[in-house]
Each structure stands twice: as C-alpha cells, then as structure tokens.
Image: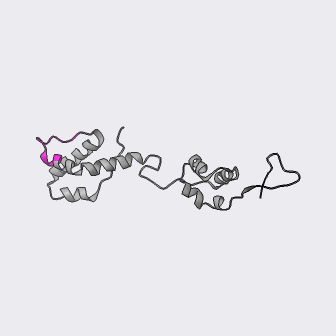
Amino acid sequence: MENKGFSVYREYWEAIKHFDREIQDRIAGATYRYVFTGEMPDPSTDPIAFGMINAWKLSLDNSIERFNNAEGFGSKGGRPKKVEGSRLAELVASGKKASEIAAILGVSVDTIYKRDEWKNRKTVSEIPVENPNETGKYVF
C-alpha cells in the first residue's frame, strides 16, 4: 500500500532544532524517504539521520497507519457522516432494527439511537380487529 501521508509532531522539531540547517535538512529528507519509500538512512554514511529516524520509527509508523486508515472518514479523520433525516425516517418506518439501519447508512448504532426519528418511532402491534389488513398489523 502506498502511504498517503503522516503527521509531523512538535517532538520532531524539538529533537533537531539545535542541529545546523544542513543536518536538519538531511533528517527531514530521510524522514520523507522513510515514510514514502520505507528506506532507512544508512548508519555508516548518515548516523545522525539514522538515529533520529530510528528513534521516531514507532511514532512515524503509527502516524502513517492512522493517516492511511482515515480514508472514508475524510482525509485526516474528519467528522462522521451526517444522517439524512428523510432516509432515516424511511428506514425506521420500514421496521428495520437500529443495527440494520446503522449498517445501511454507514454510521454507528449510537448515532441512530440519538436521532429523533428513532426516539419517536411508531411501534407495530398486533391488534385484534374485525377487519385487519393482510398482515393483521396496524401502525399507530
């Protein structure tokens, strides 16, 4: 999988800010190469960059994973999808369970439970009547 990006944390700057500009640039370049190609700096030719990337490796790997997994939630995580009320009302009226509706709309079950369309839903009950419809159920 091609990495789409990563987060840069202040700790990276704090770790290199006292180096001269040339070393900072080498470390930055080595960071980008590691993130986007997986290539680690050669410790025999650039021990400083190797040491910095090696120290940040876990943090970088976690950042890459979070960034790559954010797809579907917006480019950087983003807010959850909005639920269109009319679509939700339609699904609620059809008698589907909250878990089924959540799966259809791509949201959590909690999101469904919080919506007025779910809270104010009408229940379907068996009512003994003289002329029931074909299912024997009435919505009220």
Quick check: is 64 in the magenta stretch?
A: no
Q: Residue furthest right?
A: 130
Quick check: is 46 in the magenta stretch?
A: yes
Q: Viewed as shown, does residue 69 lie left or right of 130?
A: left
Number of callouts = 0
Span colored in magenta: 39-50
Q: Which of 107 and 31 lies nearest the eye of the viewer?
A: 107
Q: Residue furthest front?
A: 128
Q: Which of 124 and 71 lies nearest the eye of the viewer?
A: 124
Q: Which of 27 and 100 lies nearest the eye of the viewer?
A: 100
Residue 3 higher or lower than 88, as above or below: above
Q: Position of residue 94 (x, y in %)?
A: 70, 49
Q: Viewed as shown, does residue 13 lie left or right of 81?
A: left
Q: Position of residue 49 (x, y in %)?
A: 17, 47
Q: Main secondary structure of the magenta part?
A: loop
Q: Position of residue 88 (x, y in %)?
A: 64, 53
Q: Residue furthest left?
A: 44
Q: Quadrant of the C terminus?
A: bottom right
Residue at position x 59%, y 46% in the image: 104
Q: Position of residue 1 (x, y in %)?
A: 36, 37
Residue at position x 69%, y 59% in the image: 121
Residue 2 higher or lower than 26, as above or below: above
